[in-house]
Image (cartoon, rainbow, N blue to C red):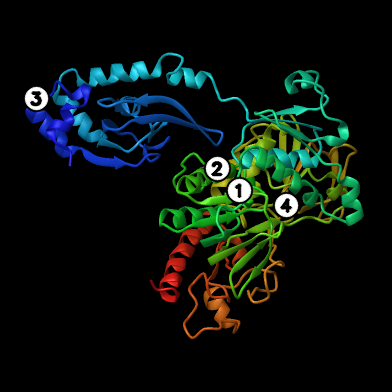
Amino acid sequence: MITPEDVAGIAIFAGLDADQRERLARASADISLLAGEFAAHQGSERALFGLLEGRIEAVRFSDGVDEIVGRRELGDVFGEVPITLGTVFPVGFRAAEPSRVLRIEPHDYHALAAVVPGLAEEVGKLAGERMSGARGLQGLAAAPSPPRAIVVGHRYDSSCADLRRFLDRNLVTFEWLVADAPDAEAVWGGPLPGADELPAVKMLDGGTVVRPLLRQVAGLLELEDADVLRPQLRRVAEGLGLATEAEAEEYDVVVVGAGPAGLAAAVYGASEGLRVLVIEREAPGGQAGTSSRIENYLGFPDGVSGDDLAGKALRQARRLGAEILVTRTITAIDSATRSVHLEAGDVIRARTIVLACGVAWRRLAIEGFDRLAGKGVFYGAARNEARNTHGLDVHVVGAGNSAGQAAVFFSRHARSVTMLVRGDGLGASMSRYLVDQIEALPNIRLLPRTEVVAAHGDASLEAIDVRDDAGETARLESGGLFIFIGADAQTEWLPPEIARDPKGYVLTGHDVQEAQRWPLARDPYLLETSVPGVFACGDVRFAPVKRVAAAVGEGSMAIAFVHQYLRDTEPV
């Protein structure tokens, strides 16, 4: 409980009379913090704090790294900038040691300021001092953090595009150099790696990872390009300090996949005291991470990109204590013991498992597509692809929301965007708000009853062949082709005990019973698979709704069922 004496210990409130101190004490929250605990996170809603005991650090979170940018000592206040300007916290405030603070809500502060002459002026003056100077907010804004890595490669190398996307989705800032740029060696800091070693990544600490000479080996072993790239990505991840190894041998929950559903499960599980491990074979974000703009997600009135949404969820999950491994592939799940086997031979025990491995974009078996994948032909459209479309004529295949969002986004960068759809129009499969936006943009045109039949180009995509419903074929110059034609579940690696429908989607709840695959007397929980204690959520689950919001909701629901399962089967 805050007392008037506590209030008097805060320098800016020392001049209040006894009644005012009593009033403020009654309105203030008494908060005790452990070392490392945040009083206010970067981006939190405004409030004013006073430090009663301990020491507080001002921390800026940038590029996945915490940077201490200031300190508060006994009697200091913090939060004066957001309370004065009506903004969120531009930096976070974290206890450097066990600390105690008082928190004043905005309406209580403004009510006090209205009757105490000079208080608002004094707080505003303090806010101005915090904002000015090289170490103030203006200085921090003028001096962005240096990139953590430099990437050099060929402009149309698909593995280079994959590498840039991997860094983006893991919240790692980097500088991208085209190998033949005049200033490439100067920025790199010396001679570039050889052409057969590109793409290459130089870490901020000086370490360098080059592409292994595995192309020939891959051809002999009939490996996919992703199989060649993944070991390199793991070396990059380890060099940047991203987690690739589990800290423990057993977890309450192992979440497979770090898309919206998996990250939601991680956030809710970790926040409720469960030890959570998330295993992601590439980078967080899932299919939603390749969405350039999501306009109808609750709470984002101006829309949000898929990678931005995934980045916020990733930071939240890590802050709450979830472990997230990247570049690790699960090779098998032992349904009897709920053991998870990784590709390097590691075995992790889990009390429960949540399958949130999502789906993969459906690929087109069309002439030229495989050869030009990543070289102008893309499945999905992450935000970082926009700069590569500047001034070009690009094409989008698909008539769903993802295609519409990409078309609107690229229209702000490309000279023109042409949407190729097999149906008569967009209204039957796309949200009305997107149809209206597309119709209002002069540089987007629609070609209905049209399909792509070939892609052409040497080093990169140069043109596409399209065919209309009359069988007429035309060749169109194209600087980029972005494909959104649906997605498929990739669940062939799951054990046969986990029931799936003919298309590979995981059955849960009532559908498991309908398939006569449920082994226990009790009914399965709504998101429980045919293996008790193994749950599924998001796009990988057999369900008619495939939306980001639905995936997030199911991820949180899965944790509720995890608690129920543990309570029923493993009583304390």
Q: Which residue is mark 1?
A: 284
Q: Earlier in the sequence, mark 4 or mark 2?
A: 2
Q: Please state the horizontal and vertical placement of residue 450, each as a whole percent of the image.
A: 78, 52
- Which residue bears the numbered disc 4? 421
Return the x and y of residue 326 as percentages of the image width and height: 64, 49
Badges 2 and 3: C-beta atoms under 8 Å apart? Answer: no
Q: Residues within 10 Å of mark 4 (few under 14, many from 20)?
A: many
Which residue type carries mark 2? Gly
Q: Quadrant of residue 405?
A: top right
Task: Say which label, 1 or 2, has the lower sequence index.
Answer: 1
Of the image marks 3 and 1, the number of the one nearer the N terminus: 3
Q: Which is in the foreground here, disc 1 or disc 4?
A: 1
Report which quarter residue 408 is drawn in.
top right
Give the numbered dot on residue 206. Answer: none
Q: Looking at the image, which residue is at 76% across and 54% down?
A: 449
Circles 1 and 2: CB atoms closer than 8 Å: yes
* Kind of residue at badge 3: Asp
Q: SS at mark 3?
A: loop
